[in-house]
Image (cartoon, grey):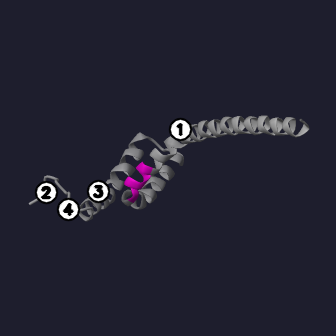
Amino acid sequence: MAGRSGTEALSRRKQALIIESNLNRIALQIECENLRAATRPLHQVATVAHRMGPWLLPLAPLAGLLAARFLRKRSGLLDTAVSLLRSLPPVLALWHHFRRTSGGQDQGPSAG
Protein backbone atom coordinates (compact mmCIF):
# COMPACT_ATOMS: atom_id res chain seq x y z
CA MET A 1 0.00 0.00 0.00
CA ALA A 2 2.85 2.38 0.78
CA GLY A 3 4.18 1.92 -2.77
CA ARG A 4 0.81 2.72 -4.28
CA SER A 5 0.40 6.02 -2.37
CA GLY A 6 3.94 7.03 -3.41
CA THR A 7 3.07 6.29 -7.04
CA GLU A 8 -0.15 8.31 -6.75
CA ALA A 9 1.77 11.23 -5.23
CA LEU A 10 4.28 11.10 -8.09
CA SER A 11 1.43 10.94 -10.60
CA ARG A 12 -0.23 14.00 -9.04
CA ARG A 13 3.11 15.83 -8.99
CA LYS A 14 3.62 14.95 -12.67
CA GLN A 15 0.17 16.30 -13.56
CA ALA A 16 0.87 19.51 -11.60
CA LEU A 17 4.17 19.97 -13.46
CA ILE A 18 2.47 19.41 -16.82
CA ILE A 19 -0.17 22.04 -15.98
CA GLU A 20 2.50 24.46 -14.77
CA SER A 21 4.51 23.87 -17.96
CA ASN A 22 1.45 24.61 -20.10
CA LEU A 23 0.79 27.83 -18.17
CA ASN A 24 4.42 28.91 -18.61
CA ARG A 25 4.25 28.12 -22.34
CA ILE A 26 1.12 30.27 -22.72
CA ALA A 27 2.72 33.12 -20.72
CA LEU A 28 5.83 32.92 -22.91
CA GLN A 29 3.71 33.04 -26.09
CA ILE A 30 1.92 36.13 -24.78
CA GLU A 31 5.24 37.82 -23.93
CA CYS A 32 6.62 37.04 -27.40
CA GLU A 33 3.53 38.54 -29.03
CA ASN A 34 3.83 41.65 -26.84
CA LEU A 35 7.48 41.97 -27.83
CA ARG A 36 6.59 41.66 -31.53
CA ALA A 37 3.90 44.33 -31.14
CA ALA A 38 6.31 46.64 -29.30
CA THR A 39 9.03 46.30 -31.94
CA ARG A 40 6.74 46.60 -34.96
CA PRO A 41 7.36 50.39 -35.27
CA LEU A 42 11.12 49.73 -35.27
CA HIS A 43 10.67 47.36 -38.19
CA GLN A 44 8.71 50.03 -40.07
CA VAL A 45 11.45 52.60 -39.42
CA ALA A 46 14.08 50.14 -40.64
CA THR A 47 12.04 49.48 -43.79
CA VAL A 48 11.76 53.19 -44.54
CA ALA A 49 15.48 53.68 -43.85
CA HIS A 50 16.28 50.79 -46.19
CA ARG A 51 14.16 52.31 -48.96
CA MET A 52 15.78 55.70 -48.48
CA GLY A 53 19.28 54.20 -48.36
CA PRO A 54 20.54 55.71 -51.64
CA TRP A 55 19.30 59.15 -50.55
CA LEU A 56 20.70 59.13 -47.02
CA LEU A 57 24.35 59.51 -48.02
CA PRO A 58 23.98 62.68 -50.13
CA LEU A 59 21.27 64.18 -47.93
CA ALA A 60 23.10 63.80 -44.60
CA PRO A 61 25.68 66.55 -45.29
CA LEU A 62 22.94 68.76 -46.69
CA ALA A 63 20.88 68.28 -43.54
CA GLY A 64 23.92 69.15 -41.44
CA LEU A 65 24.56 72.33 -43.41
CA LEU A 66 20.94 73.40 -43.16
CA ALA A 67 20.88 72.67 -39.44
CA ALA A 68 24.06 74.69 -38.93
CA ARG A 69 22.59 77.62 -40.85
CA PHE A 70 19.39 77.63 -38.84
CA LEU A 71 21.04 77.09 -35.47
CA ARG A 72 23.51 79.92 -35.74
CA LYS A 73 22.42 83.46 -34.97
CA ARG A 74 19.98 84.63 -37.60
CA SER A 75 20.50 88.04 -39.04
CA GLY A 76 17.11 88.28 -40.69
CA LEU A 77 14.56 86.65 -42.92
CA LEU A 78 16.09 88.04 -46.09
CA ASP A 79 19.54 86.62 -45.29
CA THR A 80 18.01 83.23 -44.56
CA ALA A 81 16.10 83.24 -47.84
CA VAL A 82 19.22 84.27 -49.76
CA SER A 83 21.30 81.52 -48.16
CA LEU A 84 18.62 78.94 -48.99
CA LEU A 85 18.49 80.14 -52.60
CA ARG A 86 22.29 79.88 -52.80
CA SER A 87 22.07 76.28 -51.57
CA LEU A 88 19.45 75.35 -54.15
CA PRO A 89 21.63 74.77 -57.27
CA PRO A 90 23.94 72.16 -55.67
CA VAL A 91 20.95 70.41 -54.14
CA LEU A 92 19.16 70.29 -57.48
CA ALA A 93 22.32 69.02 -59.18
CA LEU A 94 22.58 66.20 -56.63
CA TRP A 95 18.92 65.41 -57.01
CA HIS A 96 19.13 65.20 -60.80
CA HIS A 97 22.28 63.11 -60.59
CA PHE A 98 20.68 60.55 -58.27
CA ARG A 99 17.47 60.42 -60.28
CA ARG A 100 19.46 59.58 -63.42
CA THR A 101 21.56 56.95 -61.64
CA SER A 102 18.57 55.31 -59.96
CA GLY A 103 17.37 53.63 -63.13
CA GLY A 104 16.72 56.39 -65.62
CA GLN A 105 13.48 57.48 -64.04
CA ASP A 106 14.06 61.14 -64.85
CA GLN A 107 10.75 62.39 -66.22
CA GLY A 108 11.37 66.08 -65.90
CA PRO A 109 10.43 68.66 -68.56
CA SER A 110 14.02 68.77 -69.84
CA ALA A 111 13.86 65.15 -71.08
CA GLY A 112 14.49 64.92 -74.77
Dot 2 or dot 1, earlier in sequence: 1
Mark 3 lies on a secondary structure that is: helix
Where does residue 33 sit, x and y in percent of width and height?
Answer: 56, 38
For the residues bearing labels 2 and 4, Cβ distance under 8 angstroms: no
Q: Main secondary structure of the magenta part?
A: helix
Q: Nearer the viewer, residue 83 or 94?
A: 94
Quarter of the image for residue 77 reads: top left
Question: Which residue was labeled with disc 3?
Answer: 92
**Labels 2 and 4: the sequence-earlier one:** 4
Q: Depth check: 29 or 22 in front? A: 22
Quadrant containing the C terminus is bottom left
Q: Which residues are magenta?
A: 47-53
| Residue to which mark 4 is pinned | 104
Q: Which mark identifies residue 37?
A: 1
Secondary structure of the residue carrying tag 4 is loop
Mark pair 2, 1: CA separation:
47 Å
Q: Say whether residue 20 is left or right of residue 60.
A: right
Q: Is residue 44 above or below residue 61?
A: above
Contact between marks 2 and 3 (CB within 8 A): the answer is: no
Residue where numbered disc 2 is placed: 110
| 2 or 4: mark nearer the eye | 4
Label located before the other in sequence (1 or 3): 1
